[in-house]
Image (cartoon, rainbow, N blue to C red):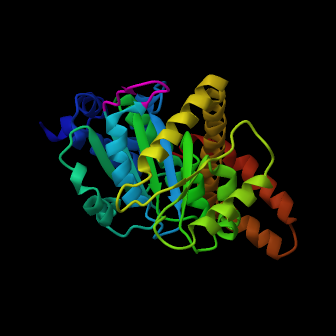
């Protein structure tokens, strides 16, 4: 395959649909890099449904990667049905999201090691993503990547974040079902409240349930949930021991139950529409912010600033003049 063919998004997507994980990885790399390459990939995925996505978030060290490793096995067994049997899942993707990874390509090397048992399964695609050149960072790169995974034919995806900052919470918000992972004895209620995790959690997971403090952690979370506004879905609390896999089957069952709830109530379409609205707002904000940075480095800005410093121009009038003059160019040139 020539260099031109290897970099052609349409050719790569066709190869990805045929099961070529290398082609899929190159397409995600294009999304991470941003610019015209990312736009080309995004256009190819337009109109395709994303995979059903589970977001796993929680403090570092909570055991999210270990749970993810065990979840892959459960997902490959299929979606649990109310009766007997399971609904098959042909393939699964895992995106391990790290906003600050220094490694080339954004690889979180530890995740690859922990999930190496699945490395030879052609139906399991594991990829790490880090902040690179995408306009708007990971909060916009991840939704693009999810649409790409849907276009490539993957029906289920797991997003794992490394922490509980605002960016991680927003990334986890790209999921259809969000599971917040906590551990006994780390002040679950207070930490979850501070991080805004209560608002996004569809499921709470108390991992490392073989340690002391599980009952207190559950009590704290139940109290927190009692104080929230009642809705048609109360986040269940699942206890797991990721190192042994105990409780992970129950967790996957709760994910399936939440999916069924969203689909039967019509909430899945509503939630996805709300998510697209937030994404569009972020894209507009990111483009405007990029345009402002360009504007601030120009001669017109320097002249306006001098006028404000000399008292011949009001700051607001200066801003109005700059924006009025620059806006058409900003919209046209911002990638």
**Residue 132 visible in the current orientation:** no
- The stretch drawn in magenta includes residue 81: yes
- Tell me what residue is drawn at x 55 percent, y 35 percent: 257
- Please tell me in which quadrant of the rendered image residue 241 appears: bottom left
The image shows residue 154, relative to residue 315, as above or below, that is above
- Please tell me in which quadrant of the rendered image residue 21 appears: top left
Magenta part, dominant SS: loop
Magenta span: 80-90
Q: Position of residue 276 (x, y in %)?
A: 61, 36
Residue 238 located left or right of residue 195:
left
Q: Position of residue 213 (x, y in %)?
A: 57, 72
- Tell me what residue is drawn at x 46 percent, y 27 percent: 81
The image shows residue 261, relative to residue 37, as above or below, that is above
Residue 166 located left or right of residue 44:
right
The image shows residue 233, relative to residue 219, as above or below, that is above
Depth order, front residue of 73/296: 73
Depth order, front residue of 1/53: 53
**Residue 321 visible in the current orientation:** yes
- The stretch drawn in magenta includes residue 144: no
């Amino acid at each position: 395959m020539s260099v031109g063919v290897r970099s052609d998004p349409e050719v790569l997507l066709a190869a990805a649909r045929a099961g070529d994980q290398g082609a899929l990885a190159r397409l995600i790399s294009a999304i991470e890099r941003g610019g015209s390459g990312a736009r080309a990939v995004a256009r190819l995925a337009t109109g395709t449904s994303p995979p059903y996505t589970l977001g796993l978030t929680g403090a570092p060290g909570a055991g999210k990667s270990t749970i993810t490793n065990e979840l892959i096995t459960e997902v490959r067994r299929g979606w649990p049905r109310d009766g007997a049997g399971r609904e098959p899942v042909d393939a699964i993707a895992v995106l391990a999201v790290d906003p600050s990874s220094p490694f080339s390509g954004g690889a979180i090397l530890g995740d690859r090691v922990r999930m190496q048992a699945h490395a030879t399964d052609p139906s399991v695609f594991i990829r790490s993503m880090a902040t690179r050149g995408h306009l708007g960072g990971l909060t916009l790169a991840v939704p693009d990547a999810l649409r790409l995974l849907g276009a490539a034919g993957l029906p289920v995806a797991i997003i794992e974040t490394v922490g509980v900052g605002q960016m991680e919470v927003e990334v986890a918000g790209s999921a259809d079902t969000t599971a917040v992972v906590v551990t006994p004895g780390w002040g679950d209620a207070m930490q979850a409240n501070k991080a805004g995790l209560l608002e996004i959690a569809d499921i709470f997971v108390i991992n490392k349930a073989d340690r002391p403090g599980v009952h207190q952690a559950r009590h704290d979370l139940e109290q927190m949930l009692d104080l929230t506004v009642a809705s048609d879905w109360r986040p269940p609390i699942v206890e797991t021991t990721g190192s042994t896999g105990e409780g992970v089957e129950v967790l996957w069952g709760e994910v399936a139950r939440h999916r069924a709830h969203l689909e039967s109530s019509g909430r899945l379409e509503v939630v996805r529409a709300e998510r697209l609205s937030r994404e569009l707002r972020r894209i507009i904000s990111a483009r405007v912010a990029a345009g402002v940075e360009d504007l601030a480095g120009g001669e017109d800005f320097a002249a306006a600033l001098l006028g404000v410093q000399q008292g011949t121009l009001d700051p607001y009038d200066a801003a109005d003049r700059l924006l009025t003059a620059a806006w058409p160019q900003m919209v046209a040139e911002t990638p």
